């Protein structure tokens, strides 16, 4: 009979810990593996030196093909500081991480931008010693930030309204490459971690909005100067009072007139009903007062959450508009599925601190005033009760999309 040979205690202990950690158990927390349900989620991840697709797949239990497809990568090459979307396993408020050879808590913390103390607490560790194959829990949100997991139908704009944080701040805080969100995507909502802006110096309150100003509706051939002469005011007073962006006027355009005054006055303008997370429902007559010719606005596609900038060209029945730049044209085309279309889409229009419910098509046609935006013409933007060019009637398709953008 061959004699039994005992393994040294150290390797035996290491083997035991590896087996336990494979099932998510740590020396300080045996029996606490997967204390909460585990779900598939997606996280924005910034590539560090030494990262490879294979290493990421091992750390986060994700297939390399899934990472490649999710990020539309044409090769396995990654670059430092590149931001990708990473499939992860989410347990409660923590991301599951499997320790690889050479890992230390310090190295992991520097890669995932979480403190060693936070990882140790989330993983219920009593020391900084970790073992290959061990499952760690990494807080999905930074200290002071709130964790939110995207649901179907969410958009950055809706989340910004819900949490009182600007779209740009959310995108920057989460290192987002686009405004399109995935169901299951991890979003960190900045909270106390952000540095509040310095308090503005006290200043005199603005004058109260003027009331009782008459409204003049522009007739064909009228100019600011001719209207000013009629009402004993100045062209500049009308221009500033109505927050105009260009001097030319459109037939039917409403203008508040500071009768008999040489200086502009503050006018609030009418407001429509607005539901949380949606646009203000405003009739075309007054939507065109806010979004007047020459105005630059930001469009948010309600379905995809994609955002781009546009400029109002003109129009008496609806707002003929153009993408502001070639980059805006590219995003707009993406919202329409990669090809231009006459189909109506529900959109939100952000202009002058207002968010209006609107509808638009995506077919370039007619004249253009921006020659370098890769959009050969303009498109049509509709508000409530806007009318079409050819029939001069309200389009049922666009009317329905405007109501959808208003949350109705």
Image: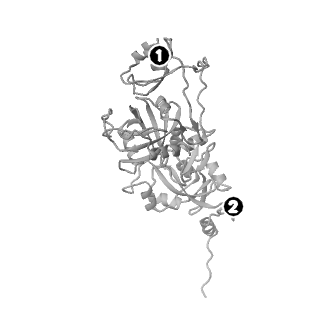
Label 2 element class: loop
Residue 329 horizontal side relative to residue 6, left or right = left
Q: Residue 64, located in which quarter of the rendered image?
A: bottom left
Label 1 element class: helix
Task: Give the x, y percent position of residue 329.
Answer: 37, 41
Q: Quadrant of the N terminus?
A: bottom right
Say which of 312 and 402 sits in front. Answer: 402
Q: Is residue 301 visible?
A: no
Residue linked to disc 2: 29
The residue that appears at 44% across and 56% down in the rendered structure is: 70
Classify 10 Å Cα crowding around label 2: few (below 14), some (14-19), many (20 and above): few
Whether label 1 touches label 2, CB < 8 Å: no
Mark 1 or mark 2, whichever is nearer to me: 1
Say which of 160 and 403 sits in front. Answer: 403
Task: Give the x, y percent position of residue 230.
Answer: 44, 14
The residue that appears at 61% across and 43% down in the rendered structure is: 145
**Vertical comparison of 310 with 119: above or below:** above
- Residues at marks 1 and 2, CA–CA distance in whole angstroms: 73 Å
The residue that appears at 38% across and 19% down in the rendered structure is: 223
Classify 10 Å Cα crowding around label 1: few (below 14), some (14-19), many (20 and above): many
Residue linked to disc 1: 237
Residue 120 horizontal side relative to residue 384, left or right = right
Q: Residue 163, located in which quarter of the rendered image?
A: top right
Say which mark, if any, is on residue 304.
none
Q: Is residue 377 visible?
A: yes
- Mark found first going from the N terminus, 1 or 2: 2
Say which of 230 and 193 sits in front. Answer: 230
What is the count of numbered marks? 2
Residue 293 horizontal side relative to residue 267, left or right = left
Task: Give the x, y percent position of residue 276.
Answer: 60, 41
Task: Give the x, y percent position of residue 268.
Answer: 56, 25
């Amino acid at each position: 009979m061959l004699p039994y040979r005992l393994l040294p205690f150290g390797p035996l202990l290491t083997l035991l810990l590896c087996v336990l950690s494979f099932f998510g158990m740590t020396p300080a927390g045996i029996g606490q593996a997967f204390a909460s349900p585990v779900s598939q989620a997606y996280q924005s991840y910034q590539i560090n030196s030494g990262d490879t697709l294979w290493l990421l797949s091992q750390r986060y239990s994700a297939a390399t093909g899934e990472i490649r497809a999710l990020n539309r990568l044409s090769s396995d090459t990654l670059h430092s500081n590149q931001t990708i979307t990473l499939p992860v396993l989410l347990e409660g408020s923590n991301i599951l991480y499997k320790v690889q050879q050479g890992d230390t808590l310090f190295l992991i913390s520097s890669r995932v931008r979480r403190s060693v103390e936070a990882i140790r607490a989330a993983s219920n560790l009593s020391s900084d010693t970790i073992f290959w194959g061990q499952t760690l829990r990494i807080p999905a949100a930074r200290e002071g930030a709130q964790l939110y997991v995207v649901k179907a139908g969410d958009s950055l704009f809706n989340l910004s309204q819900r949490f009182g944080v600007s779209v740009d701040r959310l995108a920057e805080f989460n290192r987002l490459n686009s405004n399109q969100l995935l169901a299951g995507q991890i979003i960190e909502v900045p909270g106390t971690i952000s540095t509040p802006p310095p308090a503005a110096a006290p200043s005199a309150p603005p004058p109260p909005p003027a009331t009782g100003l008459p409204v003049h509706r522009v007739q064909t051939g009228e100019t600011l100067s001719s209207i000013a002469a009629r009402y004993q005011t100045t062209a500049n007073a009308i221009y500033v009072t109505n927050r105009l962006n260009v001097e030319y006027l459109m037939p039917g355009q409403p203008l508040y007139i500071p009768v008999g005054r040489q200086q502009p006055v503050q006018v609030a303008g009418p407001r429509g009903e607005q539901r949380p997370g949606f646009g203000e429902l405003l009739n075309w007559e007054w939507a065109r007062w806010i979004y007047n010719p020459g105005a630059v606005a930001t469009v948010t596609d309600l379905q995809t959450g994609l955002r781009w900038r546009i400029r109002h060209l003109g129009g008496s029945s609806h707002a003929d508009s153009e993408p502001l730049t070639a980059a805006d044209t590219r995003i707009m085309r993406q919202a329409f599925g990669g090809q231009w279309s006459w189909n109506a889409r529900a959109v939100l229009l952000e202009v002058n601190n207002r968010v209006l419910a609107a509808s638009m098509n995506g077919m370039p046609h007619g004249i253009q005033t921006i020659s370098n935006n890769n959009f050969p013409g303009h498109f049509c933007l509709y508000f409530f009760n806007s009318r079409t060019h050819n029939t001069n009637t309200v389009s049922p398709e666009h009317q329905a999309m405007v109501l959808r953008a208003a949350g109705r």
